[in-house]
Amino acid sequence: MFSSDGRRVIAAWIALSLVVTPLVVLLLGPSLPPGKASVQGSEQVFDNTWLMGITTPIVCLLVVFFAFTLARHRHAGGELVDGPPLRNDNQVQVLWIAITSVTVMFLAGFGTYELLQNGSGGGQGPNPIAVPNGSKLQVQVIGQQWQFTYRYPSYGGLETPQLVLPADTQIELHVTSLDVIHSFWAYELGIKADANPGVDNIAFLKTKGPGTFHVRCSELCGLWHGYMFDNGRVIPQSQFAAWVKQQQRDFAPIAKYLPAYAKTYYPDPQRRAG
Amino acid sequence: MTVARRLVGFNLLTACLLGIGGWYVGWFAAHGVVGPSLEYFGSVDFNELSIVMAYLCGVLGFLIGLGFLNYPFARLRGYPPSLREKETQGASRYFGLCTDHKVVGIQYLVGIGFFFFIGGLNAMLIRTELLRPDHQVWPAGTYLTIVGLHGTMMMGMMTSGILGPFGNYFIPILIGARRMAFPRIEALTFWLLMAGGVILETAIFFGGFPTGWTGYQPLGTQANPGIDCYYIFFALVGISMTLLGLNMIATIVTMRAPGLTWTRLPIFVWGVLSTSTLMVLAAPVLIATLSMAILDRTAQTNFFIPAQGGSTYLYENLFWVFGHPEVYVLALPGFAIVLEILPVFARKPLWGYRLAVGGLLGVSLLSFFVWQHHLFFSGINGDLRPFYMFSTELISIPTGFTFLCGMMTLWRGHIRYSVPMLFCLAWFFNFFIGGITGVFLSDTPSDVTTHGSFFSMAHFHYTIMGGLVFTFFAAIYYWVPKMTGLQLNERLAKIHFWTMFVSFNSTFGPLFAAGFMGQPRRVVTYAHGLHFINVWVSISAFVLGASMLLFLYNFVKSLVFDRVPAPADPWGSKSVEWQLPSPVPVQNFDRIPTFTGDPYGYGEAGAGPVAVPAGAPAGME
Amino acid sequence: MLIGLYVAKLSTDQGSPSYTVPVASKGGHPVVDLRIETVAAVGPSLSPGHPDWVSYLVRNAHGKWLRRTVWELPADATVHVTIYNFDSATGLRNPLYARPQGVDGNSFLLDGKPMVVINPDDTSHTFAIPAYGLVIPLSGVADDAKNQCGYAPCALSMAHRTIQFTFHTGKAGHFRWQCFVPCAAGWIDGFGGPMQTIGYMDGFIDVQ
């Protein structure tokens, strides 16, 4: 089926892939985003490593093929000479279609499997289908122009502008917005959920050890979109209760004015103000 | 005819005057009718309805000034039908309504090129801002407007980037016809786009718009009046796209010369056909969506305002139902150009013709079933995500067909590295990187990091700019000798290619890393750790801009000053357009030819010219 | 030339020139007195394009009110801020911002009286520097108060509330400040127009 040139290319491709793919996976794998600060983050690193491993041989094929053909099948100069009138080769077509289809099926299946474990840290809307087992700490993320604030319903609806989470805990994030569309992106934790007004977007997170993480808005929301970021912290569980108490003291004066905790809010003014 | 006499009449000058006049008519009419009665207008010191009506009346005045209503009125008064306007000689026909498809093609080339450079200027301004995270070169609100202007201008103009200039010029020739099916509509699509481009840039006089090219609501409803310019521009683009696609489909389906069966059609024509199908089906959704958004702003409707019963999802889904086929409208002509040019410079037939056509049609079909991959984390129903992940990854299969056909066409060929071929080879490199990174974006867990980040931005620049814009230049270098009869300087062209290719990769390659490291899109500032990458990218972007200026210099110098004549067939192509003289005469063919095969008969014994007879010495119709 | 005009237009659109706040020094430590006022309508002389927009103004050393919202402050300084609010209340969208934070004592003086919270519905504007965690709600002038200010600049003889607080700058940097009250009448959610334009209800503090 393949000419001798063709066999050379295939052999070179297989050899290159066998060498490069493990290198890429082992060397690049650990530095793939987002990091291992949470279970979801670790799963995404695993996923990305696999994707890297599958795409590397494809890259190698194209590199080898083009290096070979661009060098070897050059026009030698002088009069224009036509090449052989090859219009088709059914076997090559079938082989290509088969291999690409299998790869795509595998990628789709693998991604689906990863996704259905616990949502992989992405927002799943008000009726999530990939729900991890066990009790979960409820934390609400409120996006508004141009800051995120956070409410803890299990602590009396406490609202603070800083996100602090206990380590080694299952957390159910409810992301919503008061005005326009924002997107809550906790980079190191591997969480991204859009904050839509009137929508309760749920994402699941399991924190691991203590550390800091960056929160950024990743949906254009107006003038200060680029400045809508802050730093969050994961602290040991023993310190979390103390932190909550301190926040409740700090924000005690405003507690009576806060609206009751709800999944979505429609605060005034909604239309034209003034 | 004196100059003064020539200036009076239905031409561009009249059009501009009537356009400005129309603008004021609309403005004051809306003020008079609506202004006093809606008190909230007073507190925001602008009258929303006035602005929209002003621009709409301005566009109408512009089109009337060009003479688009002349023929309909003439028919109403009983004049017989006529397919071509009185086509004057000389340069003035390029500045008005001309029904010669070749003139429209050249108008498109210059017009789109002009707005492409403006969009590119905006890109340079964006990168200037991102040189330093802590310093504002442009005020933050203006920066968002610049980002929006760049994206919107490019998306609006480059959707017709290949179909406009080269589709209009060459489709009739490639199918053996003398004209397009609807010549006046063809001219209309061009002038709508030009009016729209000017309107978009005037957004800076109305406070700009903060939404980027996607125009998400309710941020759009909250914006300054500049967003009305965005809505009207995009609506005009949508109308232009729909009409352009319609025209192409009608022409290709009904006006093919004898002997040109579907299996002998050049692959470029198949590409135009599949792109046109996407345009016709997707653009109307855009027009509807933008109309709803304008109503939200002017008529206090609540389509997209949740607290009043609307839904932000409505906008997001409607927009991306258009938006995703839109990006394939951008990508497919690139495929078609590459597959058309590769056989010429490898001197082999196009390998796997049916597979290539299948790939184009497969991409077109699947492009309607993937749009929710832009919305993976918006809170859509979780059941949908595996399906859209699957359908998005499935699109890589027909895309792979294009790669296979291209690669096997090169295999065992006699490859010449002329400038059009260089751009096509660069397409393989760029679109492949774009496609592979698309795998990371389509995989939902991986998308948690990459969605809305610079990774996604680098991906689509690699596919759109690395794909479409590179093939745009390939088509220019390939076909301008036929369109003008003049050569472009090859040395400058090669310098253009290499600087563009290297600086393009240097600009967008590192942005994958920036995205991986957490830089979101459309931000005016970023984490300090990413400073070096952003400086590197900005400097590369300036070099990329410089390479475009070099192209402009070559284009103007070769075509205006040097004027070296080009032979009728400089590339040795077997396609029918190269059997005609350069530039192609007004009636295209002396006699309508009969096609005997496809244009890829390289190396095949006994293959004669693809069409007989063609290109006899030019006579009158 | 056209490109030059275009770029020039963009550089000056929607921005604000910078204002350097004069620095006193107490025992080697920089101390700054920053006086700003918020007005309901900025007036045609200070803003010919948008005379009815709400705005912040800063007072320079000669007592003149400037419509500049980019303020240069020294690093590691103590900043005493006095805000005169001439605008009536609109109410907060998120009541959390009625609790002062990021300032000395987490409290402020309202017309001389120390406050740790105000009624969110009485809020007319806020002054907030999110990067510093600084939020101060500004109480509004009563709707039936006499002698309310029309167009800026507003004299202190007109109806107003005085808010005073102190905060500290740290290292050099470029930090944004904004208002959190949806006070832009006529825009969706009250957050368009002046609420999204530097030079009105948004700005920067440039810590040098």
Image (cartoon, helix red, strand yellow):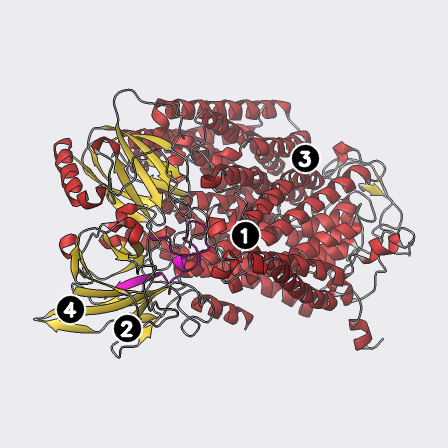
Percent x, y of residue C108? 18, 58
**Residue holding disc 4:** C31
Q: Residues within 10 Å of mark 1 (few under 14, many from 20)?
A: many
Residues in magenta? C181-208
**Residue holding disc 1:** B152
Q: Residues within 10 Å of mark 2 (few under 14, many from 20)?
A: few
- Asked if labels 4 and 1 share a chain, the reply is no
Q: Secondary structure at mark 4?
A: strand
Kindly tell me whether residue B442 is visible in this rendering: yes
Q: Quadrant of the C terminus of chain B?
A: bottom right
Closer mark to the observer between disc 4 and disc 1? 4
Percent x, y of residue B122? 50, 59
In the displayed structure, does residue C13 sit left or right of residue C108? right
Tell me the CA gap for discs 3 and 1.
46 Å
**Residue holding disc 3:** A84
- Asked if labels 4 and 2 share a chain, the reply is yes
**What chain letter is assigned to the residue under label 3?**
A
